[in-house]
Amino acid sequence: MRSLTTRNLLDKKPGETVRLSDELAACIGEAERKGCWLIYGYEKNGKTTFALMLSKTIAQYERVAYISAEEGTDKSFKDACLRAGITADDNILWDEYLSVDDLVKKFQRPRTPNIIVVDNLTIYADELKPTEVKKRIMDALPQKLLIFLGHEERKSPYPATARMASKYAKVIFHVVGLKAIVTSRFGNGGELVIDEENSELFYGQ
């Protein structure tokens, strides 16, 4: 394979980018619509709520697929959607757990959503080795942006598949006390409040 010159590198045009609200764009920057992002945090800190709010925002511009692998689509998840402001008009498709093979097969089809949220990598720990996150999912869906959710243990993403995803992720949202702390390779990062009232209670403001 031929190497790039410095001019080639600097003149190289980015691929399709993710359209975002002004608030998200200020933290994330101009992010390419491929690869993966990671949302992680301890239980009951707002990961799913944030993932749903993020999905709703992106769905203003293009279709999003949300795989509720951990919680399914029962009443508790429906209630979470309502709390996040999801309405029948939002351009989001919903699935319960899909095996890795079925997930890839489904979204390799033409005209499927380019943004796929996978909630939560814990469910895939038995069928997906950490070293397979890139090969079996990301490389199999090179034109899709995968937004993975993971838990947190000892201040690190959990399980091991989530830790591995964090190494590939170009945007990471660390959810703490109903705030998402953003680290992005495309921008300056920052903080996004998930629940203003309860976040203030958590931080004592």
Image: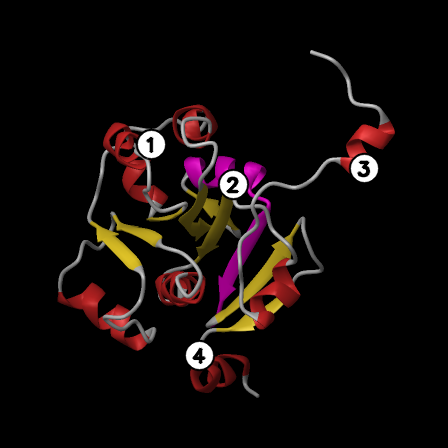
Whole-angstrom CA distance, mark 3 to mark 4, is: 40 Å
Q: Earlier in the sequence, mark 2 or mark 4?
A: 2
> What separation in Å lies between label 2 and label 3 (alpha carbons)?
20 Å
Q: Which residue is mark 3?
A: 10
Classify 10 Å Cα crowding around label 2: few (below 14), some (14-19), many (20 and above). many
Query: Secondary structure beneath disc 4?
Result: loop
Q: Amino acid at mark 3?
A: Leu
Measured from the top left, where is residue 23 in percent x and y? 58, 72
N-term mark: 2 or 1:
2
The disc labelled 4 sits on which kind of residue?
Answer: Asp
> In this figure, what is the number of numbered marks?
4
Residue kind at label 2, given as amino acid type:
Lys
Above or below 5: residue 169: below
Residue in front for this viewpoint, 117 or 22: 22
**Percent x, y for residue 193?**
52, 75
Question: What label sits on residue 195 in the rendered view?
Answer: 4
Check disc 2 and report the residue beneath it.
Answer: 34
Judged left or right of residue 179, residue 114 is left
In front: label 2 or label 3: 3
Disc 3 crowd rating (10 Å Cα; few below 14, some 14-19, many 20+) is few
Q: Nearer the viewer, mark 2 or mark 4?
A: 2
> Which residue is depicted at the point 67% across and 51% down?
186
Colouring rule applied to residues:
secondary structure
**Mark 1 and mark 4: Cα distance apart in space:** 35 Å
Is residue 77 shown in magenta? Answer: no
Residue 57: image tag: none
Q: CA distance from mark 2 to mark 4?
A: 28 Å
Point out which mark residue 108 bears: 1
